[in-house]
Image (spheres, rainbow, N blue to C red):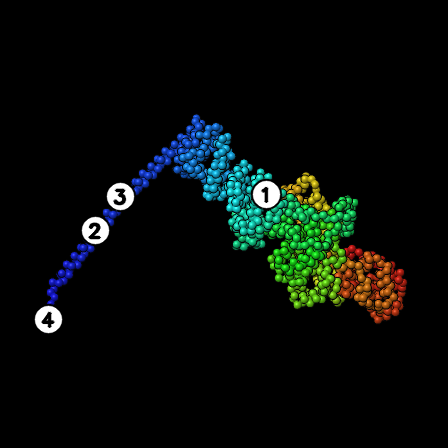
Amino acid sequence: FNTTTHVPKSMDHFENMFTATQTSKSQFLDKSRIAREERKGHKEKERAAIQIQALVRRFLCRCKLQRDIRKEVDDFIAVSDAGSAKRNALSIFKIARKLLFILSKDDKLRFEKLCRIILSSMDVENEPKVWYVSLALSKDLTIPWLKQIKDVLWVSCEFLKKLKPDILQDNKLVTLYLTMLITFTDTSTWKIIRGKGEALKPALNRICENIMGHLNQKGFYSVLQILLTNGLARSRPSLSKGTLTAIFTLSLRPVIAAYFSDNLLRSFLLHVMSVPAFISHLNTLTPDTHDLFRKFVLFLSREEQCLDICVCLEGSHTLCLLGNLIQLGYFNVKVLEQEAGHFVKDLTDMLSYCQRYVFQKKSNLTHWHPVLGWFSQTVDYGLNESMPLVTKQLQCLWGVPVICTLFCDVLSKKLETQDPTPPPPPPPSSLQNNLPVKNLFKRAFQKSASVRNILKPVGGKRVDSAEVQKVCSICVLYQTALTTLTQIRLQILTGLTYLDELLPKLWAFICELGPQGGLRLFLECLNNDTEESKQLLAMLMLFCDCSRHLITILDDIEVYEEQISFKMEELVTISSFLNTFVYKMMWDGILENAKGEKLDLFHSVHGWLMVLYERDCRRRFTPEDHWLRKDLKPSLLFQELEKGKKRAQLLLQYIPHVIPHKNDGYDQLRRLPVNSIKGVIRVKFVNDLGVDEAGIDQDGVFKEFLEEIIKKVFNPALNLFKTTSGNERLYPSPTSSIHENHLQLFEFVGKMLGKAMYEGIVVDVPFASFFLSQVLGHHHSTFYSSIDELPSLDSEFYKNLTSIKRYDGEVSDLGLSLSYDEDVMGQLVCHELIPGGKTMPVTNENKISYIHLMAHFRMHTQIKEQTAAFIRGFRSIINPEWLHMFSTPEVQRLISGDNAEIDLDDLKKHTVYYGGFHSSHRVILWLWDILSSDFTPEERAMFLKFVTSCSRPPLLGFAYLKPPFSIRCVEVSDDQDTGDTLGSVLRGFFTIRKKEPGGRLPTSSTCFNLLKLPNYSKKSILRDKLRYAISMNTGFELS
C-alpha cells in the first residue's frame, strides 16, 4: 500500500532556529580569533619593547664605553702631548687596542695622534721598554702585537686613499702615514737591533715580510696608485720629492722581499709604473740600483705577460707605462744597449695594442685622446692634465741618446770620403743669385769638406742576418709609434731627422740589402706576406716618411747649397728608386687590391716621391727625362684608359709625370674626353662709329679679342695683377679692390684664360709659380710648403725670413711680433697672423711657425678672394681633374707655350703661304736662312712674338698653332692693303715689283698668326727690316 507523509508547517521554525545557532557560533569563533591575535600582538609588543630596551641599553652602554675609551685615549694623548712622562710600549699597545676597537670616522684625529705617539716611541734612545716594536719580542704579545700593527698600517692605508695631497693639512697626514708604513715594513730604523740585537734581525725581517704580505693581500698597491695619481695626475705635482721617494721605496719592498717574482713585478707595473710621469717626477732613480729597468724589460718580453698588462691597463694607462719605461731606458743607456732587442719588442707590442683602438675619424664609439687621437677604449680624462709630461717622456724615444743607442749599427757605418768639390751653381732664375755668391760658395765648400762617395744600390747584405733583423725591428717600432701616437707624429718625425747622418746612413743600409741592392728586394717583398717582408717594407716606409718630412722643412739653401743629409746625386738616385717602386706597384696590379699596411706603404713612398718631384719642378736637380718611364708605351696606356683599366687610371691619377709629354701618346691624352665640351666663341668688334667691323672669325678674331683683354687686365698699371720682384711674374694684386667689381673681373679673366688653354691658343702671360700652384690646388696637398714657394713671390723677403731661422741669438731681441705691417695706399695696416698676434713676440720657440705663417699670409691670405674668383672662372672651363696630371711649370707651358728653343723645321713644315709666296720663293728661302743662321735664339723668340703675340712655341709643336702660321706677300702698306688680287699674286709669284719696297717694314696680324712680308730685292734688306720690326714689339705692347 502507499503511505503518504505530511510535513507539518512547524518545520520552518526549526530551520530558522538552526540558522541562528550557526550565526552565533561564527561570531563566537571570530571573537575568539580576535582575542587570540590581540594577546599575540601584546606579547610581540612586549618582546619588541624588551628588544628595543636591550638595544637602547646596549647602544647607551656602547656609547658610554666609547666615551670612556675616547676619554681614556684623550687623557693618554694629553699626557703624552704634555711630555711629562714617557709612555712605555705596553701602555701604547693597550690604548691602541682600545682605540682600534671603537675606531670610526670621528676618530681621525685620535688615530693621527696615536700614530705620532707610536713613531715618537721608536725615536727614544736606549729605552727598549718604550720602543713600540719591542713587543714583537714579547712571548705573550708577539701575535697580538703583529695583528695590531697590521691593523694600524691598513687603517693608515685607508686614510691615505682618501687624502688630497694638494691640501696642506692632508699633505702633512700623507707624510705621517707614509712614515708609519716606511717604519714598520723594514727593520733598518729599529734601534732594537743595534748591538746585541743584531741576532734578532732575521726574525724581525720575517715579521716585516709578514706585514708586507698582509698589506699586499688587502690591496696595498692600489692604495699607492690612488695616492700617486691624486698627487701627480696634474700639470704641477702636489707630492714632494721626499714623499715620492718614500712611496717608491715602499712600493719596492714587497717586490724585493719576493725576490722580484713575476706576480709582484706585475703588480708594480700595473699600479706604480702606470702612474703618469712617475719616473719623471722621481728623477732620483739614477743609477738604477736594483736593475729595475732590465727586470721590467725582460718581464714584458714574454708576449702573454705584456698582453695581460696592456689589457688590464687599457690605452691611457698603457701610454703612461710606456712613458715611464722609455724614460727609465733614457736614464740607463748602458742597460738599454744590452737589452735593446727586448726593449724594442716590448714597446712595439704595447704600441701595437694601443693601435688597435686608434681611429682616423670621430664616431659614436670613439673618445678624444690628446696623444692617440680618436680612441675606441675608455679614456681616463683625469689623466689629460698630465699628458704634456707623459708626452715629454715619450719624446725620449726619439731623443738623440736613444736614437744613437738603437741605431748604433746604422750610425757606426763609415761613409767613405773623397776629395771635396764645390757644388754646382744654382740656375740663373733661382733665389740664390740674390745672395753674395762668394759667401754662398764658401759655406757650401766648408759644408762639403768631407764629401762622401755618392750612395748607390750595391747589394751584398743578407736580409736574414741578425744586424738586418735588428734594424728592421727598430724601424717597425718607430713606424708603429708614428701610426699610433697620431697627435705627436710631427714631433716623432722631427726627432728622427734631427741627426743629419741618420737618414743617409739608413739609405746606405738599404742600398746594401739583397744581392743587387734595395729596389729588387723591396719589389719582391711586395708580393710576399712573410714577417720578414713586412719588416723590410716598414724600414722603407720609415725612411720615406722621415726623408719627406726633412726635405719639406729644409729651405733651398739647405737642400741645394749646404746639401744637408743628402747630396744632390743621392736625391737623384732615391727619386729614381721611388719612381720605379711606385710605378711597379701600380702597373703590376699591387695597388688595386692594396689595403692596410701596403696601402700605407704606397702613400709613404708616393708622398716622398712627389715632394722630390715638386722640388725638382721648382728648381731642377735631375737630368733630362729623369722622371719618364721609357718602358711605358703610351699607345698601350691609352688603350687601357679607353677600356677603363684600373692600373692605367691609377697611373694617370698618381704619377702622370712618367708619361712623356712630347709624343703621340700626349696627343692622345690631349684628346681624352672631359666632363663638358665647351662651345665656340664668336667675336665681333664694333668700331668707334658703332658699326660692326667686317671679319669672319676663324679663331683669328677671338684670338685678337683675347689679346686685347690680356693687354688690358694683365697690365700692372691696372692694379688687377702685380709683378713679382726680380723675374716679373704675374699674380693677383692684394689691393685690386680699388676696382668696384674686381672679383667679377678675376672670374672673367679666369674664364678667358681657361678658354684659351682649352682651344690651344698660347698667350704670353708669365704667372708666378705660387699662384699657379693655387690654381692647380697644390696648396691643399700634404706635400705643400708655403715657405718653399715664397721665392717665386719675393726672393728678398724669403732671404730675410730664412735669416730669422738661422739667427743664432735670441730672436725676441729683433722686436718682431706675429703680425705683418702693410702700406695700403699710404696708410699702414697691421695684419695679425694669428688672433692677438700683434701682442705676441717672435721667439726662438715660435720662429719657425712665424716664418710659415708669414709666407702663408703673403701668398694666400692677402689674395684669397681674388684667387678664389680666378679659380672659379678658370675651372668652369678647364676640368681640375685634367690639370691634376701637370706640375706647375708644365701648366705654365700649356698657357704660354714651350720654353724650348724654337724648332724652325717644324715651323717651316706647318707654314701656309699667300699672295704668291711659296716654299721655294727666294724671299721665303732668305727668311728661313736669316732666322736659322743670322738670328740669335732671343731674336727668334722676338720674331715669334711679333707674328703670334707669344714668344714661345705651342707645347705640342706648330701643328697645333691656331690659326696656322702664314706668310703673305704684300705690295702696299697696311692701311692701303685690300687683300690679294690675281695681279698681286702673280707679281708676288714671279717676283715682279711695282716699285722697290725697301722703305717698308714687315708687319703682322697676330690675331691670325700672319706675317706680311714685302717682296724685298735683297736678303740684307730683308734681314735689317725684319730685325728692326721685331725689336719694336716688346713687353706688353702686342701687335
Q: Quadrant of residue 4?
A: bottom left
Disc on the earlier residue, 4 or 1: 4
Please state which of the two labelled residues, at mark 2 or mark 1, is closer to the viewer. Answer: 1
Disc on the earlier residue, 1 or 3: 3
> Between residues 867 and 717, which one lies in front from this camera angle?
867
For this orientation, the residue located farthest to the bottom is: 1
Please state which of the two labelled residues, at mark 1 or mark 3, is closer to the viewer. Answer: 1
On the question of residue 545 being in view, the answer is: no
The residue tagged 2 is 32
The residue tagged 4 is 3
Q: Residue at x 12, y 66 (%)?
A: 7
* Type of the residue with mark 2: Ser
x and y percentages locating residue 843 in the rendered image: 65, 42
Disc on the earlier residue, 2 or 1: 2
* Mark 3 surroundings: few (<14), some (14-19) or many (≥20) residues within 10 A: few
On the question of residue 538 being in view, the answer is: yes
* Type of the residue with mark 1: Leu
> Between residues 189 and 179, which one lies in front from this camera angle?
189
- Classify residue 110 as left or right of residue 299: left
Q: Is residue 757 above or below residue 205?
A: below
> Alpha-carbon distance for marks 4 and 1?
124 Å
Disc on the earlier residue, 3 or 2: 2
> Alpha-carbon distance for marks 3 and 2?
21 Å
* Type of the residue with mark 4: Thr
The residue tagged 3 is 46
Circle number at residue 35: none
* Mark 2 surroundings: few (<14), some (14-19) or many (≥20) residues within 10 A: few
x and y percentages locating residue 346 in the rendered image: 58, 49
Q: Residue at x 82, y 57 (%)?
A: 937
Q: Residue at x 70, y 57 (%)?
A: 515
Disc on the earlier residue, 2 or 4: 4
Secondary structure at numbered mark 2: helix
